[in-house]
Image: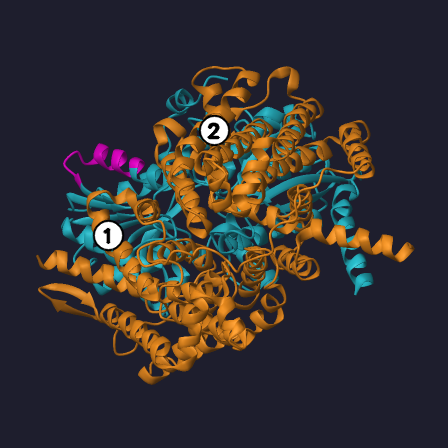
Chain colours: A orange, B cyan
Amino acid sequence: MGFYFAQLLTGLANASSLFLIASGLSIIFGVTRIVNFAHGSFYMVGAYLAYTLVTHWSGSVLGFWVSVILAAMIVGVIGLIIELTILRRIYHAPELFQLVATFGVVLIFQDGTLAIWGAEDLLGPRAPGLDSAVRIMGEPIPEYDLALIAIGPVVLLAIWLLFHKTRWGVLVRAATQDREMVGALGVNQAWLFSAAFVLGSFLAGLGGALQIPREAVSLQMDLSIIGEAFVVVVIGGMGSVSGAFVAAVLISVLNAFAILIFPQISIVLPFVIMAIVLIFRPHGLFGKPGSEKGAPEEPDQPLALMDQKSAMVLMAALLVLALSPLFTADFTSVLMVDVMVATLFAVSLHFMMGVGGMVSFGHAAYFGVGAYGAAMAVKFLGLGMISAMLFGPVCAAIAALFFGWFCVRLSGVYLAMLTLAAAQILWGVTFQWQEFTGGDDGILGVWPAKWASSDKVYFYIAFVLCIGGIWALRRVAFSPFGYILRGIRDSQTRAESIGIDTRFHQWMGFVLAGGFAGLAGVVFAFSKGSVFPDSLGIALSIDGLIMVLLGGIHALAGPILGAGAFVLIEDWVTRLDYWRFIFGAIILIVVLVAPDGIAGGVQRLLRGLKGGRA
Amino acid sequence: MNLIRRTVLGALAALPFTGLTAGVSLAQDTIVLGEVNSYTRLPAFTEPYKKGWQLAVEQINAAGGIDGKQLEVISRDDTGDPATAIRIAEELVSKDGAVLIFGTFLSNIGLAVSDFAKQKEVLFIASEPLSDAIVWSKGNKYTYRLRPSTHMQAAMLAEQAAKLDAVKWATVAPNYAYGQDAVKAFKSELSKLRPDVEFVEEQWPPLFKIDAGSTVRALEASKPDAIYNVTFGGDLAKFVREGSLRFLFEDRDVASLLTGEPEYLDPLGAEAPEGWIVTGYPSTDITTDEHKAFADAYIEKFGEAPKTGSIVGYNSILAIAAALEKADSKDTDALLAAMEGLTVDSSPTGPFTFRAADHQSTMGAYVGKTGTVDGKPSMVDWSYADGADYLPSEDDAAALRPAE
């Protein structure tokens, strides 16, 4: 009995630290609708700052708690600076575009902390006065855990009081429900947004600072917490702080007990819980319908077919690409294959997001299933390259058929998070099921057939498959099916009222996008010769998302420009020291210069040029 | 504004091409070595490694190079992604004219590059990855590995663990291939030496995401006599702190893989556990002449004591230089022939040989106990364990490899 009670307390202590970071994320999303990837970075910086301050005032109880609060406040100020200089300028960009900016901030912070605090993990002192364990029912429980268990509910109470007893809090809640109306009533939204962002960053910093007595401060802290923080926010319901608390407790306590029975489960447990919750409660435990959507936007401009001049330019560009192996080195062909794979992947994701209106945070799942499908067809079924290349996309489409059925029942960020859960579950299975998938040692020896093994020949195979795939998706976007998808995206109610089965069409759109992502995965697998679970991982999904958003979600050319720019810039900057800082800075510049994505920026540029000439 | 936008976009558009057209080094008087590692993903381990090979390259070049030719290392960051590592390897070989590739830390990247080496027929010296698969189940003709493998280090620990009275063992390891290999090897080696031991509990926290409190409690619940630990880095710090808070290590023996390496031991500071049996690297405490010379030069150049990565990086270049000298050619076939059974007679850690049968080097590791010297965590009562003693015989090892 004592043992299980102690395990419960351990879970509750973890829940408190998870809650602190998730609550800030939830508040920021609730008010500003920003999906803040940089939240993990705030958490990490909070921990590093607290480490510096705590070691400076080492030993004194007051010094410790003052350091923690001070670190959190500094992070709040950093948040304010980011909000004022970057995010404020792009609130009117398309939905989720701000996510790209926060991604740039993540990269900059990674190199910034490395430069300031160095590479080695830093283990701070234990909390003065709370540095040992007390026995409860005979089991040792660290005093600091008990303190954390108390801090979580105290912070929750403080937030509750703030939101219910102050005018500012009332405005925040109002903004969470209806931003337009709050604006119409004469409330200064800009000020409200900044304040919410500062509060959110402060809480993230506090969460990080409070970790000092529990773990070594390291450069992995940002990415290792961010996924789980999002899961907590979504399970609780976007924008609901008490929901985040319940979700944090649920995840942490379940994990504390689950590892007693099935130690390997930790890898996917949060995502499994999220998937189950979302299937039964499409807006999370305490989310309100409508909490998933961003600010109301202007409806998209209808897609226009290309005029003759653009078509000729495009053809010329394709011709140059097709002939490039004749006049460039082998390595350029290899790089171009990577560009084409990324482009097809981004185009398939754009088909889902831009044309279908379904945001995906887990599109890499289908890319990876395609790659694994082909690799396993070679290894286990002994298929040749061509038949394996057909087999892969079919596997991806089947996976998309299965997961898509669940996903299309949701919308907005909840749909996106369910796709993420699906991807993480697939990743977990691939990672864990060593006998079948090779685990993280992957599958090796998936090289092209002899006749296709030269870089140049493989370039043409990739060219045909990728450019063919991109063309096919473009063709579909202009087919009746594409028009229906776009109709559903712009107004689901109207589409339904004219007798369209919206779910079925979205489902099929999901499957199509998944299948083509699988095709990209197949080309990828044979170009690299091996597949690893990374090809289904969050990192790749995020890369795809950044490509689409950076390129411009409202144009069919967007993902093409985005993917090309992303891969080529990355290939170039990784040669430099502190390349993440440079890459992040480039992304921020693009974001600020072209809030409608590269495609939008180019369009404006062309219009400007024409205007200038006239 | 418009002008600024145009300029910026134009500059952005032109950026990637500077990369595409960067000059190819064709100088005849240098030998280009390609190097890939996870510099941004795991800087704590790869930075000392980089310093190690930089020192060796500098020393060799200062002494006249190899056969009058200077060594030039082109070093790239793989960003922690195997696919990127392969693209970079391709570029190093086909564009930069690298005669061989060395480096990598993460096992999956090591495996990906080794498969690439096999396909493109180029020599790859896997400096740091520990995975047994690289030389055994997925070994190939073109891949050699320097650092003592998971199996070897686990066997070194098992030898010491067998001398303990402990019968009931619990294990904790990060949930990925390295952790799984390390537990499997330790179990089989220890069971060979001590058929009476039993393993009563295993915990598999996710890498770098350990829920240390719950894990410690789960281990405690099984009431083991001793614990075998494979966690490292941030996970280890959390595990040690939670474990000592909850008295997990009271009256229990602990055998811990790699924990004696400065990369992992130093950050623990005053909380470093006492009396754990560990493999690692006692750095400046090693007093052989070769090591003293190395350590002095290292400290003079970088102002800090060498770490495990440093010695691995340094020995990598020593091995490569020996191979180039023996082969007297930059040709892959000649290099492969030279690597077979190549012996490096003098290195800071003593002589080592690349076994012809399984391409594993016999470079060893140091086995000892953790302790505190002058308030700093360090290894005590250590001795050097020659890798050759912890490898299966060459015939047995050859049988573990796929047929060529």
Residue at figure coordinates x 44%, y 75% from the top left? A171
Subunit of mark 2? A
Q: Which residues are magenta?
A: B184-199
- Location of mark 1 (residue): A254
- Location of mark 2 (residue): A397
Is residue B197 located in the magenta-colored stretch of the structure?
A: yes
Above or below, comparing residue A601 to residue B154 in the picture: below
Q: In front: A548, or A103?
A: A548
Residue type indicated by callout 1: Leu
Residue at figure coordinates x 56%, y 74% from the top left? A190
Residue at figure coordinates x 77%, y 60% from the top left? B5
- Label 1: state its secondary structure: helix
Magenta stretch prevailing secondary structure: helix
Residue A337 in which image quadrant: top right
Direction from residue A570 to residue A102 in the image, left or right: left
- Label 2: state its secondary structure: helix
Residue furthest to the front: A498
Residue B199: x and y in percent read 19, 40
Residue B352: x and y in percent read 49, 38
**Callouts 2 and 1 in the same chain:** yes
Q: In front: B232, or A104?
A: A104
Direction from residue B9 to residue A547 in the image, left or right: left
Residue type indicated by callout 2: Ala
Residue A292 in which image quadrant: bottom left
Above or below, comparing residue A405 to residue A27 in the picture: above
Distance, label 2 to label 1, CA atoms, is 33 Å
- Label at residue A463: none
